[in-house]
Image (spheres, rainbow, N blue to C red):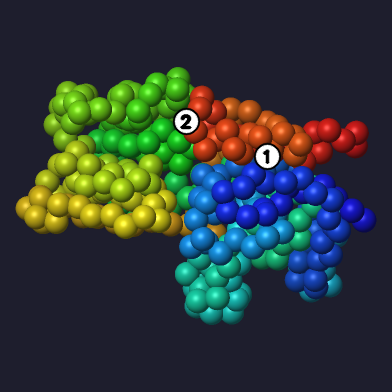
Amino acid sequence: MRMQAAIFDALRQPLRLAELATPEPDRYQVLLKVCRCGICGSDLHITEDPVFGARQGDVLGHEYSGEVLEVGAEVAGLKVGDQVTAAPLFGCGQCDSCRRGEPAWCTQMQLTGGGYAQYAAVAARQCRKLPWGISAADGALAEPLAVALHGVMQAGLKPGDKVLVVGAGAIGLAVAFWARRMGAGAVAVSDLNRHQEARAMDLGAGAFLVAGEDLARQANEHFGGQADVVFECVGKPGLIDHCIGLVRPRGTVLVLGLCTARDHFDAFRAISKEVRIVMSVFFSMQEFGSAIDALDGGRYAPQALISDTISLAELPTAFEALRQRTTQCKVLVDPFADVAC
């Protein structure tokens, strides 16, 4: 059987549509008919920076959900017809980290893709069944929601905290969602423009601040003082230092932005304020499960992150457009949008 996919050719080149052989699951894997796959900012990084080691012919896309079509001989707990979402974290399955449900910190961890295609083979232990009432179309949001949740947990956010989120991309907005859900006293989101202002408010922010030279003043006026926790969700050099200036003495700067360039910050200012700087990446499988549960409605619905759903044929063009600031937030790919099925 053949399938359509969008493949990586070379750094700084657009993805290319191709026809490939449908992957065959091994005895520990399931074959999924991909329902939705989110376009992630890290995929953009992967196609630009050699540090990630992308190879010609790779199928990217790690935020995906779908229907189980085949199960390997050693698979338990999943069956044909199940609706699942897949975590892209593949560990050995045997070490202490894997047994704790933390494959991201397995010494053999691999970040798996495959979602920019009609079918994907993935280890069954990477999949979680979607509860009744949560669609596979929404299930693709579980991965970015889990990334944001892990960041909020790493920050040690407490009820009543004043939270400033720097960067109104999908992860920043998901952080605002979790901060509000976990009892933050005030949540503000800042960005260079107002493209995501309405979406930020829908997800739980109480204010949207346009970033600029007076951001510290705006934030202090909103909070009645400096923020307790500042989340850096951009990933550009200089932003950690900027956030150190925005947080209160003995506050926390939580870094979620993916930055591959060398960076620096004013260490004396950070030490003088006794700022706690915490890095965050990936998530645990328990957090992944909590992200799935959060898709089941509530006052603030994470489905508000979705700005558009496109076909595989539209993916290469949309992918390139997202390299520039746009009004889009989380764009989902429907690999069967142009197929009668």
Q: Is residue 313 visible?
A: yes
Q: Quadrant of the C terminus?
A: top right
Q: Which residue is mark 2?
A: 325
Which residue corresponds to the image point at 26% horizontal and 46% vertical from the top-left?
238
Callout 2 amino acid: Arg
Looking at the image, how many numbered discs can be counted on the residues?
A: 2
Q: Nearer the viewer, residue 332 or 283?
A: 332
- Which label number is shown at residue 242? none
- Residue 146 horizontal side relative to residue 15, left or right: left
Disc nearer the start of the sequence (1/2): 1
Identify the image quadrant of residue 173. Answer: top left
Q: Is residue 229 visible?
A: no
- Residue 280 horizontal side relative to residue 95, left or right: left
The image shows residue 227, relative to residue 129, as above or below, that is above
Tell me residue 116's x, y (percent): 71, 48
Q: Secondary structure at mark 2?
A: loop
Residue extending farthest left: 272
Q: Residues within 10 Å of mark 2 (few under 14, many from 20)?
A: few
Tell me residue 255's x, y (percent): 33, 50
- Residue 259 horizontal side relative to residue 199, left or right: left
Which residue corresponds to the image point at 52% horizontal and 51% vertical from the top-left?
48
- Residue 151 horizontal side relative to residue 121, left or right: left
Tell me residue 94's x, y (percent): 59, 79
The image shows residue 202, relative to residue 16, as above or below, that is above
- Which label number is shown at residue 316? 1
Which residue corresponds to the image point at 12% horizontal and 46% vertical from the top-left?
249
Which residue corresponds to the image point at 75% horizontal and 39% vertical from the top-left?
312
Callout 1 amino acid: Pro
